[in-house]
Amino acid sequence: MARTVRFHETGDPHVLRLEELEVGEPGPGEVRIRVEAIGLNRAEAMFRRDRYIEPVKRLPARLGYEAAGVIEAVGAGVTGLSPAQRVSVVPAFSQNDYGVYAEQAIVPAAAVVRRPDNVDAVSGAAFWMPFVTVYGALVEIGGMRAGDTVVLNAASSSVGLAAIQTANRLGAIPIAVTRTAAKKERLHKEGAAAVIVSDEEDVVACVRGLTGGRGADHVLDAVAGPGVTDLARAVAPDGTIFLYGALSGRPTPHPGMELGMPALNVRTYTLFEVTRDPRRLRRAEAFVASGLETGAFRPVVDRTFELEEIVRAHEYLESNAQIGKIVVTVPR
C-alpha cells in the first residue's frame, strides 16, 4: 500500500485527498518508481478544476506529471532501465491514465529519464518540465539563435526562469514581463536583460524601444487571451508567438486579421510535442543535461512541502506568489 493523492470531485485544492492504495506491478512498457519528490505544475491545478486541455474522464482521479525517484520494478519489454536506477519522470502521458502524486507510482517507461548522480531528488523533480518546455518551443521548433530577442510573460514561473537561462546560454536576449514591480529585482538577478512591469508600462512600446523598433523574434506566452493582440504588435516580421498556457482563462483571438495580416506566426505549443517524440526527447535530454553539467542551467525552487501538505501546496501554487518551482517531498 502507498499513500496516493486523488480527488473524488473537481474543484479547489480542498478536494485533494491522501489515500492508501495498492500500487501493483508495472505492465508492459511501464516502470514502478519509489517517489522521492514531486514537481507541481499549473496544468495539474487546471486538471483538478476540470479546466485543462483534456477533461477529467473518470473519478476518483489521480494527479501529477513530474517526479524524481528510484526505479523499483520494470515491466515486460522495458529496455535501458533497471531497478535501483535514479530517474526523473517527465510529462509524456495523460493524467487520466497515470499520476505521480504518491509514495509509489507506475508510469510509462517512455516518460522516464535518467537522473544524473549529482542531482538530488528535489532538483530532479524541478528542472525537466521547465527546461524541456523551453527547449521544445524556442530551440527545437523556434530555432532561437545568438542575438535573437525573446519576450516572456509569467516570467517568474519555472518555465519563465528556464527561458531566461536558456536564452542566456545561447546568446539570445531575454526580456521578462511581470505584472507588478514586486518581482522585478529578482528577475534581473535571475538573468533577464530587461524587465517590463505590465501594470505600469506599455509592453509594446518597451519591447519596440529595447529592440530598436524591430520587435521580438520570439514570444513565449503563458497567459493568452485578448492580450495576445498587444503582444503581436511587439513581434518582429516573421517572428513567432508560442501560446503554451492559458492563465487568462479567456478566449484567445488570432491577431493577424486585426493587425492587417502581418508576417506573424502564432502557434499553440505543449511540451508533449517533445516528450512524446523519442528523437526530440533524446535531443532535449542531452541539451538540458549538458546545461546542468556546465552550470548554465539550475533549477529555481521557491518552496517545498511534504506530501501530507498537498492541499497547502496547491493553495500556494494558485496564489501566484512563487518565483520558480514548488516541490513536494515524499518522506519515507
Image (spheres, grey):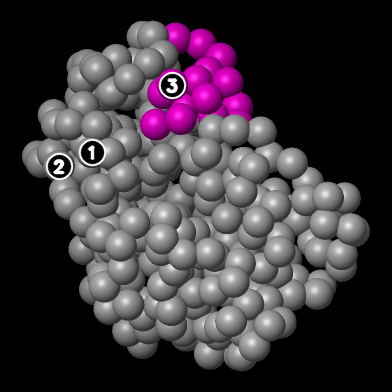
Does residue 109 lie above or below 183 as drawn?
above
Q: CA distance from mark 2 to mark 3?
A: 21 Å
Pick out the residue farthest to the left. Answer: 332
Mark 1: few/some/many CA within 10 Å (<14, 14-19, 20+):
some
For marks 3 and 1 on the same chain, the one whose residue lies earlier in the sequence: 3
Q: Is 262 above or below relative to 39?
A: below
Magenta residues, as a range? 45-60
The prevailing secondary structure element of the residues shown in magenta is loop
Q: Is residue 168 placed above or below 323 in the rendered structure?
A: below
- In which quadrant of the rendered image does the N terminus lie? top left
Q: Which one is closest to the eye, mark 2 or mark 3?
A: 3
Judging depth in this view, the residue of 206 and 63 nearest the camera is: 206
Residue drawn at 47 percent across, 85 percent down: 169
Alpha carbon separation for disc pair 1 and 2: 10 Å
Residue at which label 1 appears = 316
Q: Residue at x 41, y 23 (%)?
A: 48
Residue 139 position in % (x across, y down): 63, 73
Residue 244 badge: none
Identity of the amino acid at label 1? Tyr
Which amino acid type is marked by label 2? Phe
Q: Is residue 70 visible?
A: no
Q: Does residue 127 show up magenta in the picture?
A: no
Which three-letter amino acid code belongs to the residue tagged 3?
Answer: Arg
> Left or right of 240: which side holds 46?
left
Q: Are marks 2 and 3 in contact (CB under 8 Å)?
A: no
| Residue 189 relative to residue 174: left or right | left
Marks 3/1 in contact by CB < 8 Å: the verdict is no
Q: For numbered disc 2, what is the local secondary structure? A: strand
The residue identified by callout 2 is: 305
Q: Are marks 1 and 2 in contact (CB under 8 Å)?
A: yes
Rounded to the nearest whole Å, what is the CA distance between mark 3 and mark 1? 15 Å
- Secondary element under disc 1, as helix, strand or loop, is helix
